[in-house]
Amino acid sequence: MQSPQHRQTWDLIPWLVNGTATASDRALAEAHLAACADCRDEYAFQSRVHAGLGVEAAVADEPGPAFGRLLERIEAEQAGQAAPAHAPRQRRLLRALAAAVVVQAIGLATLGAWAVGHRRADDAPAYRTLSTPAAEPAMASLRFVPSPELSVGQLQRLLGDNGLHIVGTNEGGTIYTLAPVASAHTDAGVIARLRAAPGVLLVEPIANPSAR
Amino acid sequence: MLEDGHRRSLDRVSQRRTDHDHAAGSETELEWLRAIARQDRTAFEQLYRSYHGPLSRFLARFTARRDLIEEMVNETLWVVWRTAGSFRGESKVRTWIIGIAYRCLMKQLRDHPAEPTYGAGDRDQEALHEVAPDESEARQAELRDWLRHGMALLPDEQRMTIELAYYLGQSCEEIAAIMNCAVGTVKARMFHARLRLRNTLPALGGDAVPQSHSAQA
């Protein structure tokens, strides 16, 4: 029968090999490795894997041109933000539709709460309009960055399917603050679904570690 | 008592990690990120140049298409530029950025499942071997080829776990943060990946593994 030390050491071997095991774990494993040929063999095997994977696989291009292209993208976006009077009609339409998403989500939440009769008045979901600056809204649970290709319709479906609504946005309208419509927090499943959805670049929980 | 060879190996790995941490300049990266949050383009360029190579090489292990690699690197660092102000120090800057790159990569793998080929980026290195063959380099190429076949048989999540641990040197907890899963899930993925490698690599030439590598790492 295998000892607990054997199983612990076996599990620790990758982290010994890549040098991230804690000092106490290292001490435990070293003591067992000295007495266990199987673990020494596995350590040697994983060391070979580590050595093989550690070899640089490809030559990276010079970063200058790629950085230039990224800067062009950033400057184009900032130019759009700095000159709202010249902003394309499509951008204004997008913002108007985003605001409509907020109104729709709030309306649905209120209607749903009224229909089931379980919600007390002081539990109504807090929200902010897109034009409200300053601190994060009380119910804010997620920071959300869609790709420019994500359409308003796709955004509406994504938020509706996951029980979320928009409670804030940055000046450029590129980063949204989301909150759950009905519950007190956003569970990890919602975060995973959002991250897995096409057209989503970043989803991060706000202030609530249990949501991760 | 641990054999001298293994102890030296452990010490060397530990030292390498320590050196790496210092070299990575976590504090410097944090300062860059704070400056980027203030829209400081000089800091952004420094961070970009610091990460362009490692991210490109990491992503090249999953696709040979340089246009896709640049797209993913730029997408990652674009998100960094836009959200630097939201970084709250819950992880290292490096882990946070790798997490963003990981999500870009997973989307790429999901959206274009037929295109990426594991280890395809190694072609550059193979071309170098053809130009200047050398005994130790030939051994490395053999080992890498041997591993490429074994790694290609792993499910994406297991392969990614091994790469994050062995190529990017991330800890179990850091990998959990990057992959947005529990530490126990990382341990389970690592466990099953090791079993699969153990079972598949001997059949694919494990006996021919260069013995000189056994004491390395």
Image (spheres, rainbow, N blue to C red):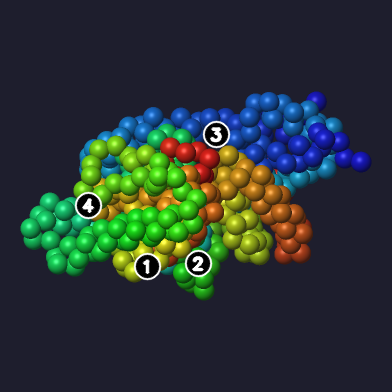
- The amino acid at mark 1 is Gln
**Left or right: A120 in relation to A62:** right
Q: Residues within 10 Å of mark 1 (few under 14, many from 20)?
A: some
- The amino acid at mark 2 is Arg
Quarter of the image where one finds residue B152: bottom right
> Circle 1 sits on which residue?
A154
> Circle 2 sits on which residue?
B110
- The amino acid at mark 4 is Gly
Residue B17 is labelled as: 3
Mark 1 → mark 2, Cα distance in angstroms: 18 Å
Q: Secondary structure at mark 1?
A: helix
- Disc 3 and disc 1 on one polypeptide chain: no
Quarter of the image where one finds residue B104: bottom left
Parent chain of label 1: A
**Left or right: B96 in relation to B8:** left
Mark 2 → mark 3, Cα distance in angstroms: 32 Å
> Circle 4 sits on which residue?
A172
Q: Split into 4 quadrants, where in the image is the N terminus of chain A? A: top right
Q: Secondary structure at mark 2?
A: helix
C-beta proximity under 8 Å, tags 3 and 1: no
Give the image location of residue A47, x and y in percent: 67, 44
Parent chain of label 4: A
